[in-house]
Image: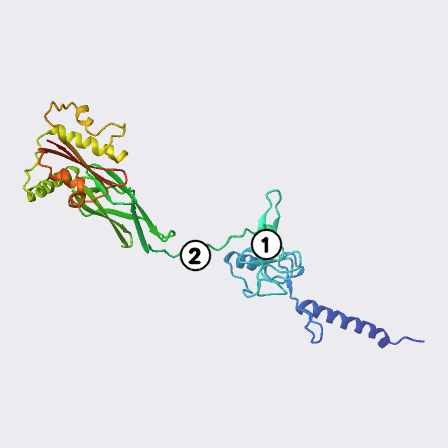
Amino acid sequence: MKTTLIEYKIPVIIAAIFICIGTIFILFGIPEIDGDSEASSVDAVPDSYTGEKSVLNIDVEDEQMREENGDMKDSESMIDPDDSVVTDGVKNLKLNDGKQSGIDSENPEQPHDNTLTSDPNSNTEQMQNTSPESASDSDFEYVPNPAPAPLPVPVSNISMSIDRTTTSRYKVGDTGSVAVVVFPSNATDKGYQLTVNDPSILTVSQNGQFTAVAYGTAVITATSANGVRRDVAVTVLDMDTLAQEVIRLTNEERSKKGASSLSVDNSLLSATAVTRAREIITSFSHMRPDGRKQSTVYEDLGGSYNGRYMETGENIAAGHISSTAVVTAWMNSIENKANILNTQYTHIGVSVDMDSSGKLYWVQIFYG
């Protein structure tokens, strides 16, 4: 059978057609095809240096310039589907569990605290994951909230007491102390200031120590920082003043009965009264603490009767707070009144003393 020219030409024509189609695909690329699968277009760019065709997605030089200027084409998406993303020139590696840096795929609202750390022994960057899921209790230090500052507690009251429990009397030259207690005990500022209304009678220091200076009554005041005040009165007695008042009142009573006034010009007699006033604090009796008569004091001090003072007498008292009170009490006693009004006596000695509790002791010595 003869083969016609047409039979020979058909394969050639078909081959030419495929060659043309292939050339078109190479020059213009494969067109996108609509359907379930997606295909991206690929540009065939001739290589001006080699004459060969290579496939590129993006110009390399343009990409480097954009990285240097921080101008990323897709600024909204910080995630690269590959193992890393580029954000303003900083590479964030993807976590080992498949979650991208900065975003929790299961809980996008809860950020992870992922930081890059560099291993000094290697050139690779390591991810340090301190997210709440991976951190243990030992990774956290419990810092309690500071306690609120307590409200200030003001001073509401002050109490004051002196070292003598039964009286507030002191004699000139005595020292004492005043104790101050501030209420409530948990007051914020328990400080106070001590003052005295008349420093000529009494002086006081801030530690509560005071000194009796002169006859009279002084008031010590404690004042807290918020103005709460408390006062205590201290009476200072001058023993000499009290003694002189007793002599005056005694002669006044004698004058009422027509008796002459008693003289006080015998200093030795006054010294005898001073000794006896001290002794009756120890033993309140007309007998001395050693058992001898009270009249022996005068001789012990260097005095001598020599028949001069044949008549002697003594009045004693304790607890009276004034000269008037003690003279009145003696005048109400028969024996004491007799000594005061005895016309045989010509001289008198008087002394007043005070014990540590502030109790007063009085002595009259008569000679004639």
Q: Is residue 296 above or below residue 237?
A: above
Name the quarter where the N terminus is drawn.
bottom right
Left or right of 297? Residue 20 is right
* Kind of residue indicated by mark 1: Thr
Secondary structure type for disc 1: loop
Q: Is residue 291 above or below residue 22?
A: above
Residue 90 occupies quadrant: bottom right
Q: Mark number for residue 148?
A: 2
Coordinates of residue 239 in the picture (x, y in percent): 17, 38
Residue 55 occupies quadrant: bottom right
Q: How crowded is the residue under tag 1: few (<14 C-alpha within 10 Å), some, or many (20+)?
A: some
Most foreground residue, 324 or 154: 324
Most foreground residue, 52 or 237: 237
Left or right of 14? Residue 198 is left
Q: Earlier in the sequence, mark 1 or mark 2?
A: 1
Q: Which residue is mark 1?
A: 130
Left or right of 308? Residue 283 is right
